[in-house]
Image (cartoon, rainbow, N blue to C red):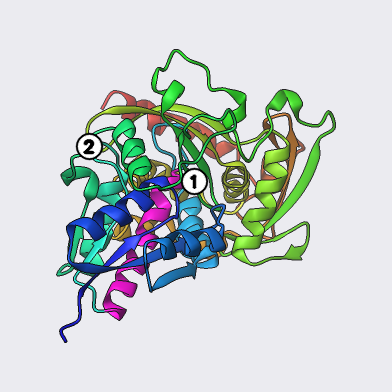
């Protein structure tokens, strides 16, 4: 007997991917394999397995990728100080390349002819997933339900779910939920009342941070240690990448740090509004810039700042595996071996304040910068320096 073809579905166990699972079974003569990448999102393994089994799924894969996600994706991005359109720390964007890569690994293992995802036809994630699929599995078919099925709206989805007795989750107010994406680096919330930019984001949508007003009245302090450009310990305690970021999320979240409300320009050409929470990532970004300020030379720092907008845009657009991103990463990492030391931060009601920077690097010289008289800096050279630039001004 000839075995059925196989499709590997990126499956969360939630409403959208449960509907897609049923739809794939109805419309394709194929076995659907459910794949979940654990990148630090709130994950209920029993729920995922039970929901998939309700539809007769035999192969359910849940892969723990948390440390890989932080070490090989978040940390390189932090080293590049990647910020999209001035404020967005790219929490959703940076997870998709890893999920796509590992989903293709599973597809090859099971000799699947196709992969599928739950990204909507108006969003960026469809691009991010599919560029990753193409990079690692160019001959594997991609099924994007939102672009081909007859379900055109959230209302259509809910009606389909009711028809097939698929449970419909509720938000904290008992209504159908917002569109939420979360991982160890961030949480994003979109849709419903947020679609109109004149509306304030309701407080109940925030999941990993308190409002600055409700944060403690006393500041918290944290020291982050860096080696070769990456953090490796908090307050002197070495932690794995995933545990380190998780600890910073707790510290930042309880102090109201890392909230962003952004109307962004999507890669596909429309504007959308998202509310993001990135408490630990915000602390890492502040600390990394602070340690670089005392360990890197001016030219290296400024070069990094010049390439950052393009570097961030490539990540946002799903070009993590592009030759251009690899090239920019080499520029970003050119002097990372010099980025060693510690930064102490004060966290207070949504604010991150640099308390101190410590390093053995020679890039910063107390003697040279001191207002006290010393022989380490020749002030007579300054006049020649200014005269040189006077000539350049008119050239």
The magenta region covers 90-110
Looking at the picture, does residue 382 appear above or below residue 132? above
Asked where in the image residue 29 lies, by quadrant, the reply is bottom left
**Which residue is labeled 2 in the image?**
268
Mark number, residue 298: 1
Q: Nearer the viewer, mark 1 or mark 2?
A: 2
Foreground residue, 22 or 186? 22
- Residue 229 in sight from this viewpoint: no
Identity of the residue furthest to the right in this view = 218
Q: CA distance from mark 1 to mark 2?
A: 36 Å
Q: Residue 5: x, y in percent?
A: 19, 73
- SS type, badge 1: helix
* Left or right relative to 26: residue 354: right
Viewport quadrant of the N terminus: bottom left
Viewport quadrant of the C terminus: top left
Looking at the picture, does residue 274 appear above or below residue 113? above
Foreground residue, 42 or 351? 42
- In magenta segment, residue 107: yes
Foreground residue, 336 or 287? 287
Q: Are the residues flagged by discs 1 and 2 in contact, CB closer than 8 Å?
A: no
Mark number, residue 29: none
- SS type, badge 2: loop
Task: Identify the residue at horizontal 78%, vertical 56% (top origin).
Answer: 235
Q: Residue 205: x, y in percent?
A: 57, 31
Q: Residue 149: x, y in percent?
A: 18, 44
Task: Identify the residue at horizontal 39%, vertical 32% (top origin).
Answer: 85
- Residue 85 in sight from this viewpoint: yes
Q: Residue 260: x, y in percent?
A: 52, 30
Asked where in the image residue 43 lies, by quadrant, the reply is bottom right
């Amino acid at each position: 007997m000839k075995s059925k073809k196989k499709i590997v579905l990126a499956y969360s166990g939630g409403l959208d991917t449960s509907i897609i699972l049923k739809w794939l079974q109805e419309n394709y003569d194929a076995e659907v394999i459910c794949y979940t990448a654990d990148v630090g999102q709130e994950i209920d393994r029993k729920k995922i397995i039970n929901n998939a089994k309700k539809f007769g799924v035999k192969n359910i894969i849940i892969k723990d990728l948390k440390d890989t996600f932080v070490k090989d994706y978040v940390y390189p991005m932090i080293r590049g100080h990647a910020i999209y359109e001035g404020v967005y720390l790219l929490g959703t964007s940076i997870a998709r390349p890893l999920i796509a890569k590992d989903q293709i690994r599973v597809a090859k293992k099971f000799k699947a002819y196709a992969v599928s995802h739950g990204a909507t036809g108006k969003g960026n994630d469809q691009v991010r997933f599919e560029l990753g699929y193409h990079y690692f599995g160019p001959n594997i078919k991609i099924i994007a339900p939102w672009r081909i099925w007859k379900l055109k709206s959230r209302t259509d989805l809910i009606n389909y779910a009711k028809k097939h007795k698929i449970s419909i989750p509720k938000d904290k107010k008992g209504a159908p939920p917002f569109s939420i994406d979360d991982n160890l680096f961030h949480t994003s919330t979109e849709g419903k009342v947020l679609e109109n930019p004149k509306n304030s984001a309701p407080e109940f949508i925030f999941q990993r941070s308190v409002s600055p007003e409700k944060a403690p009245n006393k500041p918290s302090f944290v020291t982050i240690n860096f080696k070769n450009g990456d953090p490796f310990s908090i307050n002197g305690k070495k932690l794995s990448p995933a545990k380190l970021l998780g600890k910073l999320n707790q510290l930042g979240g309880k102090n109201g740090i890392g909230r962003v409300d952004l109307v962004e320009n999507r890669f596909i050409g429309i504007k959308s509004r998202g509310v993001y929470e990135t408490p630990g990532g915000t602390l890492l970004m502040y600390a990394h810039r602070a340690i670089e300020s005392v360990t890197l030379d001016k030219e290296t720092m400024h070069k990094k700042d010049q390439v950052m907008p393009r570097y961030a845009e490539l990540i946002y657009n799903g070009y993590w595996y592009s030759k251009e991103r690899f090239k920019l990463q080499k520029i970003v990492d050119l002097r990372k071996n010099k980025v060693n030391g510690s930064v102490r931060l004060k966290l207070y009601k949504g604010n991150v304040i640099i308390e101190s920077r410590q390093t053995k690097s020679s890039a910063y010289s107390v003697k040279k910068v001191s207002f006290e008289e010393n022989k380490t800096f020749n002030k007579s050279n300054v006049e020649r320096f200014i005269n040189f630039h006077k000539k350049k001004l008119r050239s």
